[in-house]
Amino acid sequence: MDRLLRDSYNTKKQMLKLVCALVLLNVVVIILVVIRIFQNAGDAPMYVVAGSEGHFYGEVSVYPHSDEESGNLYFFLPGKKDSSDYRLYIEKAKEIKIGNKSYHAGDKLDKSIITYAGEGNKRLLENGNSYTLVKKNGDVAEGKIFFMCGGDVETFYISASKNHMETVDEDPQHKTRAAATFEIYDSGNVKESAGALKISGHGNSTWTELMEEFPGREFKRSYNISFDSAKEILGMSAAKSFVLLSNFYDESEAKSYIVLDTARKLGMENVPDCKYANLYINGEYRGLYLVAKKIKEGNGFLDLSSDGYLAKFDYEERVKADGNVFTQINNNFAEIVYPGKPSSKELEDITNDLTTLENAISSGEFTNLVDEESFVKFYLIQEFFENGDADRASQYVYKAGMDNKLIAGPVWDFDLTMGHPWFSYDGAEINALWIKGLVDEKGWLRQLSNDDAFMGKICRYYRDYFSDVIEKEMDSTFPLVMYKIESSFYMDMIRYERGPEYYDKFDYAKYGYDRFDSLGIIGETKNWVMARKSFWDGYVKNPDEYEVFITEPGKGTKSIRSLIVMKNKRENIK
């Protein structure tokens, strides 16, 4: 009996220790979370902590965006409200009253005041919720407050030293790299992955030119991020380097995704994986981003042999930027991306190889030197979507090894496409042979546009494969993806409403849409693609039925090309 009593006592003692240990662990976790919250809070009068539904603490702290013109406060919250909890914290204040309800530090937000874009954005913009913040010194702050959540889009949360991030954002040359930590959460605010990374700026016209033209103004920046070793993030296969694309010039947020997804379905090699995410840096919402693998040799992307190379044709001033290794092939300039630091012999071999290829393209005798199918697909991608940078910027080619054929690609950079306002011809561009209209005739694609045999292959490939892929992309993939990002799209538009207007914005009134109508912008993008498809479907059946009309750019556009418009002869008969 004594032994049984002792065993029972020991068992209870062990259970008590276990319970105490679990309680202590939870207390430590809560303390760490609270410390993190208050370290990041800064001078924000209030902030929200997001977590998965049912948890009594969260990990993602979000601070409000203040619109200086209207005085409104906007909380752009991560995740879906039906699977998340959002708790409100206030700094140096007693309480906050939102509508008719009072909140104290740590109170859970009433989900009735949190909205998605699809829940009546017009009402939200006009009304919002009134708030009264009672500070500890007795002062009172009042205004309108808006709570929106990103819905089905995942969260990319980066924490870095504030001073270091300011240095990154102020560096137009992108030489500054800041150490940071990251966390990725699913749409229910459950953590998927975490670790360390380095972050730096990314982009040319979407960064450097904006800093020069709008000094001191805030705008949506793109970033490069890199890990010490290849990582899987957002469901993409492992890689070491990624780009956080802001899609600054693309109000639809859809163009790069559409093109990359189309290229992948065409079977093009080494198409960068990409996924949408809402980006937060130090608790500040930075917007909806397209996270894509960086075009860089090795570490999970574009594995080349030691005698292979990756070259990027671009504008002369970009190619010759400080630190780049480049070569000139006749009148074209190419940055040597890989090898990163080629020897003089390697650079000479690459230059000679590219020169031989260009001469072969000029003479029409290139088919034995290149992967012709890759060139056909690459040409059609640039042509069909009417890339404003086609044949002059971000045009990659590579060889796995010197004995291999040259491959066109990987494809990249499609914000200036699909009827972008910079290239306005009052809609005539839909019926145009885009690349043939280039004023500059030095590029490889422009030279190929004069090769009848090559253009015959373009028409056949479009008819046999490309047309069907585009139709399926527009009918199935595109609507599903755009529905997924709709709420985040809306948050992004509100977040950067006061940003620099570097080009003509979407004209909502012209098309009869409400302000910030995501379906309006996306709908017009789809309409453009389908109208473009209608032209190409007709043209490839019998090009001889079409005649050439030359159209010049409209006033105020940045296009540098005439437009070769193909009009059906029968339709022109009066």
Image: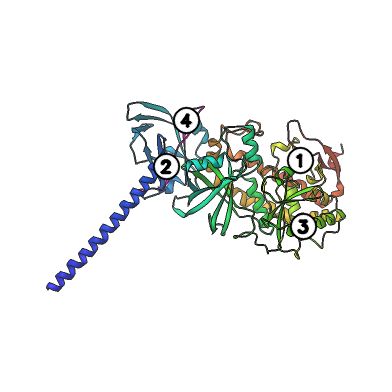
Determine which residue is flagged by label 1: 429
Looking at the rendered image, the disc whose residue lies closer to the viewer, 2 or 1, is 2
Looking at the rendered image, the disc whose residue lies closer to the viewer, 3 or 4, is 3
Determine which residue is flagged by label 2: 40
Quadrant for the C terminus, please: top right
Front one among 54 and 444: 444
> In the visual, does 82 lie left or right of 393?
left
Residue type (three-letter) at the residue carrying disc 3: Glu
Determine which residue is flagged by label 4: 72
Quadrant for the N terminus, please: bottom left
Label 1 to label 4, Cα distance in Å? Answer: 41 Å
Front one among 402 and 251: 402
Name the secondary structure under disc 3: helix
Determine which residue is flagged by label 3: 348
Q: Which x, y percent locates residue 488?
A: 53, 43
Magenta part of the protein: which range? 57-76
Label 1 to label 3, Cα distance in Å? Answer: 40 Å
Looking at the rendered image, the disc whose residue lies closer to the viewer, 1 or 3, is 3
334 in the magenta segment:
no
